[in-house]
Amino acid sequence: MPAHHHGHPHGQHHQGHHHHGEGLAALLDLDAEVLRKYHAGIVGWVREHAAGREPATIVDLGAGTGAGTLELLAQFPRASVVAVDSDAAMLERLTSNAARRGLAGRVRTVIADLDAGWPDGIGEADLVWAANSMHHLADPGRVLREIQAVLPAGGLLAVIELGSFPRFLPADAGVGRPGLEERCHEAMARRRAEDMPHMGADWAATLTGAGFEVRAERRFAADLPAPAPEAAGRYAVASLRRSREGLADDLDAEDIAALDALLDEQGPHSILRRTDLTVRAERLGWIAARPA
């Protein structure tokens, strides 16, 4: 797929990014660490809907560094996961993350760009998990029909998409003009509207159009108050650094200078020195079944 979130974390996501590199991998791992309980709640919701049909094989499309894969393995202890991503380095990191938890024997990786066609190496699945990956695809409808073909009657697909990217700072961050983080998000939204036209799609309608029965929809909101855990500071730095790199031509000089001051880990305005950081994020979920 274009591989997993890629262009952002904010998830997992992700297939289909062009080259992302170490920075995005680290950001995805921090997202998984800081929002672990939140991710566990989403997988738990899927597990409730799979009750009575314990999956033996789960496919994670756009697996990234494995936040979804690891939580799926934890909550479906008899299942194995086929982790699919277009980025080999991401999958190597996923394998290492699984090995550290003693789970490597239950994971198989497949390097594939879903826009190039459904890969032979995936095989059949009882459950397909697609977190922050569907919006990267050039033709989600085609991929959804291909997903349906590998599921048994009644088999489930979970689509998790970003409702909002993480926010960390108060409206007045104490450097530059108030509203800095919101302006960054608005600029990123304009970029994504050009680069990823399926971001924010009506996935219920898209799933139905591909022949699925939509069983459930849900909004998941994370709101970690201050003082946020130590890793939240590193997560904020990684996320805003990525914004700073991607928005150099979209923000004015004052906002760029303010971002630079926040990202200067040795400076007086460093994000890592703050005690008022919070983590606010939202994801949207759909569970659909292949009709019997």
Image (cartoon, rainbow, N blue to C red):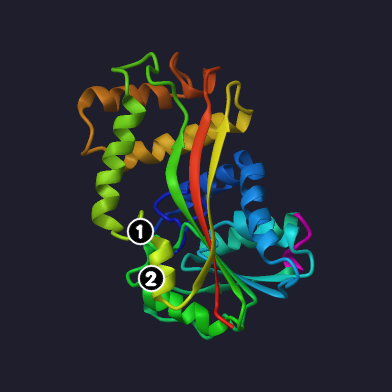
Is residue 236 depicted above or below 50 in this figure? above
| Mark 1 touches mark 2? (CB < 8 Å) | yes
Gap between marks 1 and 2 measured at Cα: 10 Å
* Disc 2: CA contacts within 10 A as few (<14), some (14-19) or many (>=20): many
Which residue is under mark 2?
140
Q: Can residue 20 be seen by looking at this rendering?
A: yes
* Image: magenta residue range: 101-105
Q: What residue is drawn where x is 47% and y is 74%?
A: 112
Q: Is residue 176 left or right of residue 132?
A: left
Q: As rendered, which of 257 and 126 lies closer to the eye?
A: 126
Residue 263 lies left or right of residue 247; in this view the side is: right
Give the residue type at disc 1.
Ala
Q: Can you tell which of label 1 and label 2 is closer to the viewer?
A: 1
Above or below for 115 versus 124: above
Mainly helix, strand or loop, the magenta region? loop
Of the pair 100 and 139, the residue shown nearer to us = 139
* SS for callout 1: loop
The numbered mark at residue 201 is 1
Quadrant of the snapshot with the N terminus = bottom left
For the residue pair 122 and 135, the one nearer the viewer reads as 135
Of marks 1 and 2, which one's residue comes earlier in the chain?
2
